[in-house]
Amino acid sequence: MRGSIHWVVVAAGLGSRLSAETRKAGVALLGVPMVVHSMRAVAGAPGSVGGTLVVHPDDLGRAAEEWIPALEQASSWSVVTGGATRAESVARGVEAAPETAEWIGVHDAARPLLDPGDLDRLLARMAEPGEAGGDGAGELAGAILAAPVADTLQRVDGDRIVETVDRSILRAAQTPQVFTRAAWRAARERGECAGTDEASWLVASGLEVRVVEARRPNPKVTVAADLRTCEAHLRARA
């Protein structure tokens, strides 16, 4: 059974590699800020009870006055400032979630191409039973979107190849990453997150997280060329 879900959209990064005049979240794609595309991708999902946008302190006013009002669901969304790390930023977003939210979904503002079908399959997987439940009751702790690794991977020592890594057992983690509120609390009790995403934290805490393969492009915007790629995909979908 699907749970009620509160979204945390993380948009607090600087995006320095993008070489843009504004921080990454505010960069326009087809005339719409990237962060608005990303929020719209999750805000209307079945079971959603709102969300929290986590932004750089200098973007607080813009987020409240421009970005959140661009949502049809604006009344159920709020904005908070991010912390010094991604983990701290996500924690601030989760703390703003209402107690009615059974699940927490974390999505990067830098992934504006999230496909509705991929999101629906992710939430459907979360609703299925797991082996080691997030609260000990037989439910999954979490599920994430991920993609197969296409390139050949080499483990190296300096510039010397040590071995070829079996890519068939590797997946490139994406967002959204969805987890139960009980799993979040259990992981928090075990200490601070040392990983670069929420899934790594939950797994390190001994909780079960499953992977749902993304069937449509869901790249993370990092450099200027990514903007052109995203705009091309958005035009094709229009």
Image (cartoon, rainbow, N blue to C red):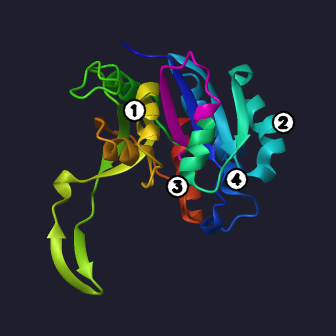
Residue at image position (31%, 27%) is 140
Task: Answer left or right for 196 relative to 147.
Answer: right
Instruction: Using the numbered discs, state the Cα–Cα distance from disc 2 to disc 3 in whole angstroms.
Output: 28 Å
Q: Mark 4 = which residue?
A: 27
Q: Which of marks 2 and 1 is nearer the N terminus?
A: 2
Disc 4: CA contacts within 10 A as few (<14), some (14-19) or many (>=20)? some
Label 3 Cα neighbours within 10 Å, binned few <14 / some 14-19 / many ≥20 = few
Q: Earlier in the sequence, mark 2 or mark 3?
A: 2
What is the spatial separation of the Cα atoms under label 2 and label 1, in whole angstroms?
30 Å
* Residues at circles 3 and 1 in contact by the CB criterion of under 8 Å: no
Question: Which stretch is magenta?
Answer: 94-111
Please tell me whether mark 1 sits on a helix, a strand or a loop.
helix
Q: Which residue in the protein does label 1 denote?
A: 118
Q: Under tag 2, what secondary structure?
A: helix
Say which of 21 and 65 sits in front. 65
Instruction: Write the residue at 37% across / 40% down.
Output: 145
Determine which residue is flagged by label 2. Answer: 65
Amino acid type of disc 1? Asp
**Tag 4: residue type?**
Val
| Mark closer to the chain start, 4 or 2 | 4
Mark 1 crowd level (few <14, some 14–19, many ≥20, 10 Å Cα): some
In percent of width and height, residue 157 lies at: 25, 83
